[in-house]
Amino acid sequence: MHRTHTCGELSLSDLGKEVTLAGWVQKSRDLGGMTFIDVRDRYGITQLTFNADDDATLRANARELGREYVIKVNGKVIERSSKNLKIPTGEVEIKVSSLEVLNSAKLPPFLIEDETDGGDDLRMKYRYLDLRRNPVRNNLVLRHKMAQEVRKYLDGLNFIEVETPVLIKSTPEGARDFVVPSRMNPGEFYALPQSPQTFKQLLMVSGVDRYFQIVKCFRDEDLRADRQPEFTQIDCEMSYIEQEDILNVFEGLIRHLFKAVKGIDLAEVPRMSYADAMRLYGSDKPDIRFGMQFVELNDVVKGVGFPVFDNAELVVGINAKGSAEYTRKQLDELTDFVKRPQIGATGMIYCRHNADGLKSSVDKFFNEDELKKWSAAFNSEVGDLMLILAGPADKVRKQLNELRLEMGTRLGLRDKNTFAPLWVLDFPLLEWDEETERYHAMHHPFTSPKPEDIALLDSKPGEVRANAYDMVLNGTEIGGGSIRIHDRALQSLMFKHLGFSPDEAQKQFGFLLDAFEYGAPPHGGIAFGFDRLCSLFAGLDTIRDVIAFPKNNSGRDVMIDSPSTIDDKQLNELKIKSTI
Amino acid sequence: MHRTHTCGELSLSDLGKEVTLAGWVQKSRDLGGMTFIDVRDRYGITQLTFNADDDATLRANARELGREYVIKVNGKVIERSSKNLKIPTGEVEIKVSSLEVLNSAKLPPFLIEDETDGGDDLRMKYRYLDLRRNPVRNNLVLRHKMAQEVRKYLDGLNFIEVETPVLIKSTPEGARDFVVPSRMNPGEFYALPQSPQTFKQLLMVSGVDRYFQIVKCFRDEDLRADRQPEFTQIDCEMSYIEQEDILNVFEGLIRHLFKAVKGIDLAEVPRMSYADAMRLYGSDKPDIRFGMQFVELNDVVKGVGFPVFDNAELVVGINAKGSAEYTRKQLDELTDFVKRPQIGATGMIYCRHNADGLKSSVDKFFNEDELKKWSAAFNSEVGDLMLILAGPADKVRKQLNELRLEMGTRLGLRDKNTFAPLWVLDFPLLEWDEETERYHAMHHPFTSPKPEDIALLDSKPGEVRANAYDMVLNGTEIGGGSIRIHDRALQSLMFKHLGFSPDEAQKQFGFLLDAFEYGAPPHGGIAFGFDRLCSLFAGLDTIRDVIAFPKNNSGRDVMIDSPSTIDDKQLNELKIKSTI
C-alpha cells in the first residue's frame, strides 16, 4: 500500500499512529542535525522530520531529495514543537522511520507554488506542472463541484441527462463548423455540434419532457476574445412550459449553485427588458453590481446653441458619484479612453458638482442655470461628476457603456466577490446584418416570436420581439435561451424570413420540420456557458484557467503540439487531400 | 400555465381538484354518449372523460382528436367507476371542462405503443417517435440514473471529474482516428480521442490524485459488431495505488450501481487469471452465470489409436449436464454449429451418460472401460452429455468456448436477469500480430509489466504478464485497465519493444515521456464501456437501444442524413479537397 493517509488529513487526534504517506517534496530545510521536509499532495501538506541522531543514513538520504521528488515514507505522528496554525495539519509532524523514492524529478521549469515565476507560454507547455499549483488545480475541483451540483439540482426536478451525438451534420450557416471526413462514407463529412439545439428539440418531440446535458460544443472561429474552439455548455430544454417556468427553474439553478458552492444566499434575480437594458446601460448584458444608469439629456441640453449636442441624435451621460475631485489629468485619460478606436467617441463632456457650484467643460455654452437642469436630470449631489457623450443613439450608448464600466472599475464598484445576476428579456427576434444585407436570427432560427408581434414580421421585422432571454452575471452573459417554435408553418415562415428557400429549409432542417408534424409539444430551453460560469465563480478573468488543457489563441495545444500534420496514408484512406 | 400535474401523478387523494393536464392522445374510445381519451406523457397515462350530456360541443371536439395530438385540458379529478389497477392513475379520471389542441399530428408511421409494428429502418428514421415508446425512452432514463449514480459514488471517494480535450493529436497507430482539419492552422489536423488515456495520466502527474470522466470517445472502424463510431466511457485513474486498490474501488462501483439502480446486492466479484480463463473457458471474458468448465482430456483419451485425438495438440470437452437425451438431430445441429466457418471445428465427439451405461460417438475406438475414464474426468452422472473437441490448443479452446455458450443458451443458463461479474487478471503484456509480424500491446503501450516479468521482455516477450485487468459481466467485457508505467526509462523500453524508434516515440509521446521526468507518481486506472454497461443493465442485446440517436452499421444517422457532402466554399476554407 502506498499510503494510509493523505497529506492533508493528520491532526492531533492521530498522535502516536504509525502512518504511511506519499506525495511530492514541496521543500526541504536543515536545522542542526535535523532535516524537515514538506510533503504535498492534492489534499494538503504534512511536515516530515529526519533526525541524524536517530538514523544518520536516513537523514542523509532525505537531504538528497530534490523538489518535486515523489516519495513514500513510514513514520509516527508526533506533536510539532513549532506549530503552523495556518494549515490543518500544522500541529503535527511525522517522525520518519523509512523513506522510499518512488520517482525522481528534474528541476521544474518554474516554481510549483501558489505564486509562480513561470510565464504564460511556459506554463501552457508544461500544463501538467502548472496544474500542480494549488490555485490552478483548485479551479478543476471547483468545476467538478459545480457540475455535480448542476446535476443534483436538475435531477431533483426530473430532468434527465441525455447524450446527443458529437458527429452530426454540417449546415450552410455552419461557416464555423469543424468537419470530420467519414472513412466509411468517402466524400462525406460529419460536423461537430456548435450546440445540440435540434437534438434537444427532437427530444422534446419524443416526450423526454425535461432534458439537460453538460456537453462539449465546438466552434472554429477567431479565438481572441477569450474563447476556446471546444467549450462546455449546460444545455437544457423543457416541454409544456412558458417563459415564466424557464425563468423560475433556472434562476433556481443559479441560486442553488451559489448556495451549494459558495455558501451565498442570492437575492431574487431582477428582470429587465432588452429595450431598458440598452436605454439604461447601453448593453444587453449590463453589469448591475453598481448603478450609474444612463441619463438621457436631449430634452435638457438641446437648443442652447452647442452644436455637438444640437446635432446629436442622442446626448446621454452618467453620474460618477463622488468623483468631482477627478483631476484634469484623470479626465483627459477618460477622454482618451472613449476616443480609442475600438470605442470611437469623438469627445467627452463633463460637469463637476462642487461645493461652490457646477463646473462644466462647456461653460462657454451653458450657464449656471442651464447646468442646474443637468444636475436635476442626473440627480447629482456635491462631489459628483457627470460624464456626457453625444452622437448617433446606438453608437453613443455603446460608447457610454464602455465608459460606465471603466468608471465602475476605477471606483472599485466591480468587486469579484459581489455577484449581481440579471434576466434580460424580450430580445429582438431578428437583427440586420450590414455585411450580408439581410436579417439574421438574433438567438437562432428556432426561437419563437412573441405571438402579438408575429403580424409585424412582414412590415417591420426589426421590431418583432422574441420569447428569448439571457441570464447576465456581473456584466457577462452566462446563459441564454428561448421558447421555441413548435409549429411547422411558423418555422417555415421563419426560415423564409431568414432567406432560406423552401428547398434549402427542407434539405437542412427537414427532419425537424417533419418532426413538428407528428405532435410537437410547446417547449423551450436555455444553455449556460459552463466555462464562463466556472470562471466567474472562481473570480478569474479568463475561461482558460477553469479548463484542464486549454488551447491558445491560435487554437493550438502547445503541450501535445496539436493540431499537426498527418501522413498521406491516412489522408488517402479518408479520400481527402490538403491543398496547401 | 400548460399543466398543474403530469399525466402520471393523480390518484384518489386528488379527488375533487381542478387540474390542468397536457400530453399526447394515446387512444380514444366512445361508449354511449361518452368519449374516453387516454392522455400520455413521460410520467404516465391519465383517462379523460367527455360527456355529451354536459357539453355536446366539447365532446364532439374530443372525438376529432387523432392519435398523438398534443392537447391541454382542464377538468375535475373524479373517481373511476371501472378502475384500472395496473397503472398508478387508474383509480381516477378527469371530467374535462375545456380542451385545447396545442398541436395536431399526422398519423405516425408506426404504432407508439410498447409493442410496435415498425421495422428497424423506419424506427431509426423516425427515432424521435420511437423514443416516445416507453421501453425505448425508459432506457434513456435508466442511462441517466446510472450516470448519476456513477458520479455520486466516485464523488464520495474524492474523485473529481475533469473534462479532457476532444480536439487532440493524431497518432500513427491512430489508424482509426477521426481527424478534423483546422481552419486556423491550414494543412494541420486535430484527431478525436479514442480514449483520454494520455490526458488522464498527465492529470496524475499533476497531482489530481483521483480522476474520472464520463466521456465520449471515437473510433472510425468497422461497425458490424454492435459498435458505434462514438461511444461513451466511464474513464478513471488513481495515483499512489496498487492493483488491489483499483479492484476494490471499482468492484465497489459496480456493486453500488447494482444496488442503487436495480436493487440487487451483488456478491463479491470473483477473480480469475487470464491463463485460467483461457484454460477453463477458452475465453478472456467467460460467462460464469453457469459452470460447464472445460475438462482437458489429453491424459485420458490419447494412445488408444483414435487418430483425431492422438494427433491433436489438445482434446478438451464440456459436460452438458442433463442433456443425455439430446436426439441425434440435436447433436447434428451442434456438430453443424461448431463446423460453421466462423467457428471452424472439424467435428465433435460426444458421449452420453445413460442409465444403462456410457454411449459415445466413437465406440469403435473406446470401450466401456475407456469411457469410464472419460466419465471420471468429466465427473459425469446419469443424464449428462459430454461434448468433446480436438485440435490446436488455441483454436480448439475458442471453438469450445462457442459451443459452451451455445449449450448455456440452449439450457437456459444465461438468464438476462442473473448477473455474474468477474475480474480477469494477469493479462499478457504483448500479443503477436500475424499481419504486421510484430508484438502489439494487448492493452495499450502505457501498461506496466509485472515487475517480476520485466526480465523476460527480451527473451520471451510473449510470456510477460501485465498489471492489467478486465471486468467481465455475463460474458461481456465491461471494463478494463492497468497499472501504468510511470518511469521514463521503462516507458521508452516498452516503445522500443513495440517497434518505435526513439525519434518516433519522442515525436508522438514526447510530452508524456517528458512529464514522467518531473515527478510522476505511481498510478493506474480503468475504463468502463458505459453504453454496454447500460445495455446489460437494461437486459438488451444491443448498445443502440441505450443511445438516444445512434448511427447505423454504415456510421450513418439516417434521421438527420449525416454524414453528408459539404460545399466547396467550406472545403476551400479548410484547405482540403475531396479525392473522390
Image (cartoon, coloured by chain):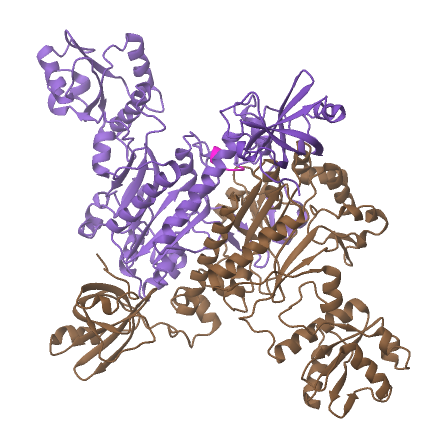
Chain colours: A purple, B brown
At which x and y percent is residue A288? 27, 31
Q: Give the residues drawn in magenta, as a range.
A: A545-549
At which x and y percent is residue B103? 26, 64
Residue shown at 91%/82% (left/top)? B305
User: Is B502 above or below relative to B305?
Assistant: above
State left or right for residue A77 relative to residue A455.
right
Q: Residue B300, located in which quarter of the rendered image?
A: bottom right
State left or right for residue A60 relative to residue A168.
right
Residue A70 in sight in this render: yes
Q: Main secondary structure of the magenta part?
A: loop
Residue B169 in sight in this render: no
State left or right for residue B212 relative to residue A396.
right
- Which quadrant: the N terminus of chain A? top right
Residue reaching furthest to the left: A369
Q: Is residue B170 magenta?
A: no
User: Is B225 above or below relative to A395?
Assistant: below
Of B536 and A462, which appears nearest the observer? B536
At which x and y percent is residue B434? 78, 59
Q: Residue B90, located in which quarter of the rendered image?
A: bottom left
